[in-house]
Amino acid sequence: MLKQILQAYRTYGVMVEAEEKIREMFELAKNIFSASSLAILEQRNVEFDLYARDREINELVVDIRKKIVEHLSISACHNVGGELIFIKVTTDIERVGDYSKNLLDLAKLLPKPLINSRYYRKLKGIFPKVESFFDKAERALFDGSETDANDVIEGHLEINQACEEILASLLQDPKLSSHEAVAYALTARYFKRISSHLKNVASTAVNPFSHIGFMNPEEPVINEKG
């Protein structure tokens, strides 16, 4: 369904421009996520102004919304599915940028690097999985790839469970220092939320607009834990 909608909307110049800008948002968000994650996991320096790139994402959101509203105001087409999807996913990508920025803020606050603990190893294993979701979510959105969409959705379920297990273990571990416990907990939280927003984007390929972000339109809607 999404694939057919996008094919129709690519006849409109403004929607082609909106697609290009959303692709730019994906690239910016992925760069921010990768750099901030490596800053906290490997103490790598960020070689660009991450906060400026996050502001670029925000500016693109505003620009895309304005163009879509202008398009709707002059278009004779009353099927607004594509426009609604684009507005929804720009919000999700913008939130990815925000949570990625939070990761860098956390890395700057750490009094010392994270040690090679079981929590650290789990988080380091989660990072590349989330990173792989960016390209898959983009293909799901713009190519209508159900394979990529399902990979992200199913992968998010695994990441969600892994992050919940980290939090549960942290609460029962008396040996950790406060700064380690907070760092592990917040990193797990941010990874989980970033994964969730990319899952929302990917679900556009397999779900109707009313169920974007949920697992299956045939199942009852259950709010996911934050």
Image (cartoon, grey):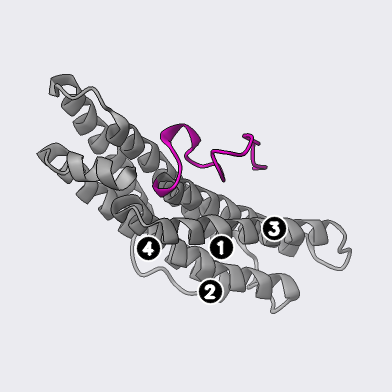
Q: In which quarter of the image is residue 147?
A: bottom left
Kindly report which numbered mark, 2 or 4, lies closer to the viewer in this rendering: 4
Question: Secondary structure beneath disc 4?
Answer: helix
Q: Distance between the residues labelled 3 and 1?
A: 24 Å
N-terminal of the pair, mark 4 or mark 3, is 4
For this view, does 8 lie left or right of residue 140?
left
Q: Check disc 1 and give the amino acid type.
A: Ala
> Whole-Å distance between the Cαs marked 4 and 3?
22 Å
Q: From the viewer's perspective, is the residue at label 1 or at label 4 nearer? A: 4
Residue numbers of the magenta segment = 205-226
Q: Which residue position holds label 2?
A: 43
Residue carrying label 4: 135
Upstream in the sequence, badge 1 or badge 4? 1
Upstream in the sequence, badge 2 or badge 4? 2
**Label ID, residue 107:** 1
The percent position of residue 179, horizontal first and vertical second, equals 72, 61
Number of residues whose C-alpha sits closer than 10 Å to that of mark 3, classed few (under 14), some (14–19) or many (20 or more): few
Residue 225 belongs to magenta span: yes
Tags 1 and 2 in contact by the CB under 8 Å rule?
yes
Query: How many angstroms separate mark 2 from mark 3 (CA)?
Result: 26 Å
Residue at screen point 27% across, 32% down: 65
The location of residue 35, given as percent across then percent down, is 43, 67
Q: Main secondary structure of the magenta part?
A: loop
Quarter the N terminus occupies = top left
What's under tag 4, amino acid-wise?
Asp
Residue on which the image places disc 3: 161
How far, Cα to Cα, is label 1 from label 4? 25 Å
Give percent across and percent down for residue 67.
Answer: 19, 32
Where does the image place residue 112, in percent across and percent down from the top left? 65, 71
What is the spatial separation of the Cα atoms under label 2 and label 4, in whole angstroms? Answer: 25 Å
Which numbered disc, 1 or 2, marks the residue that appears first in the sequence?
A: 2
